[in-house]
Amino acid sequence: MTIHADTLAQLTEALQERGLYLMADVHFTRAPYRHNHRWVCAVE
């Protein structure tokens, strides 16, 4: 699943909506990075 957000706060909220509250809960297939002024990450 790929998540896009305008800010890191929004990225955190999007992860929390999926039940991922701790970094230990998140299995990144691609760590958060900036692309065209947006934050993008891919999680399992």
Image: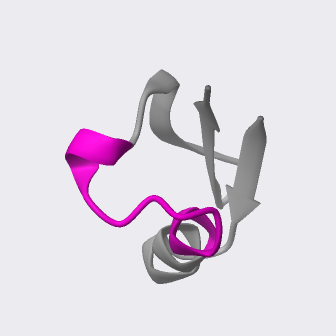
Q: Is residue 25 visible?
A: yes
Residue 29, horizontal then vertical, whole percent: 53, 18
Residue sitting nearer the eye, 41 or 24: 24
Residue 12 lies left or right of residue 43; in this view the side is left
Q: On screen, 31 above or below 22?
A: above
Residue 38, horizontal then vertical, whole percent: 67, 59
Residue 4 lies left or right of residue 34; in this view the side is right
Q: On screen, 25 above or below 8?
A: above
Q: Quadrant of residue 44?
A: top right
Residue in the picture at 55% in, 67% down? 11
The residue lying furthest to the top in this view is: 29
Residue in the picture at 53% in, 64% down? 19
Residue sitting nearer the eye, 8 or 37: 8
Q: On screen, 18 above or below 34?
A: below
Tell me, yes or no, whether the highlighted magenta stretch contains residue 12: no
Write down the region rendered in magenta. 14-25
Q: Quadrant of residue 9?
A: bottom left
Residue 40, horizontal then vertical, whole percent: 64, 46
